[in-house]
Image: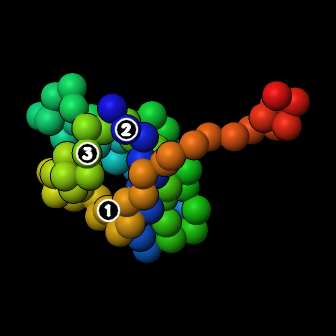
């Protein structure tokens, strides 16, 4: 599977409380269950009006299907081609 970062523009997402975030995660998980093993949610980063999600997926099409089923927009989908971190400098 390929790795993608999904930028979702959602006004005031950064103001949601923990229960609202749990509900949102549950909605996403329900959509993932419908789509099967072709897509996996790894993690998400929440900012004021955006959420950045990291997914493993067969292709962008299944990510768009997830966006429709979950109700969370996929404003921009970008395939991740490489990953670096501080240890990369030592290699």
Per the image, the residue denoted by label 2 is 2
Q: Which residue is at a point 42% across and 40% down the rendered structure image?
A: 3
Q: Residues within 10 Å of mark 1 (few under 14, many from 20)?
A: many
Badge nearest the viewer, 1 or 2:
2
Q: Which residue is at a point 16% across and 57% down the rendered structure image?
A: 68
Query: Helix, strand or loop at disc 2?
Result: strand
Q: Quadrant of residue 39?
A: top left
Badge nearest the viewer, 1 or 3:
3
Q: Which of marks 2 and 3 is nearer the N terminus?
A: 2
Considering depth in this image, is 41 or 23 the residue closer to the camera? 41
Q: Which residue is at a point 29% across and 59% down the rendered structure image?
A: 72
Considering depth in this image, is 70 or 40 the residue closer to the camera? 40
Decide if residue 30 is in sight here.
Answer: no
Q: Residues within 10 Å of mark 2 (few under 14, many from 20)?
A: few
Measured along the vertical axis of the image, is residue 90 above or below residue 46?
above
Query: Helix, strand or loop at disc 3?
Result: loop
Query: Helix, strand or loop at disc 1?
Result: loop
Q: Distance between the residues labelled 1 and 3?
A: 13 Å
Horizontal and vertical percent position of residue 73: 29, 64
Q: Which residue is at a point 38% across and 66% down the rendered structure image?
A: 76
Q: How crowded is mark 3: few (under 14 residues within 10 Å), some or many (20 or more)?
A: some
Per the image, the residue denoted by label 1 is 74
Report the quarter where the C terminus lies.
top right
Per the image, the residue denoted by label 3 is 59
Residue 49 image label: none
Q: Distance between the residues labelled 2 and 3?
A: 7 Å
Measured along the vertical axis of the image, is residue 40 above or below residue 75?
above
Considering depth in this image, is 7 or 79 the residue closer to the camera? 79
Horizontal and vertical percent position of residue 55: 39, 41
Q: Which residue lies furthest to the front in this view?
A: 91
């Amino acid at each position: 599977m390929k790795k993608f970062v999904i930028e979702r523009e959602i006004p005031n997402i950064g103001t949601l409380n923990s229960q609202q975030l749990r509900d949102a995660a549950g909605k996403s998980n329900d959509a993932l269950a419908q789509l099967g093993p072709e897509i996996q949610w790894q993690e998400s980063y929440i900012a004021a009006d955006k959420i950045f999600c990291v997914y493993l997926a067969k292709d962008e099409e299944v990510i768009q299907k997830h966006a429709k089923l979950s109700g969370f927009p996929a404003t921009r989908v970008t395939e991740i081609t490489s990953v670096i971190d501080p240890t990369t400098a030592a290699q």
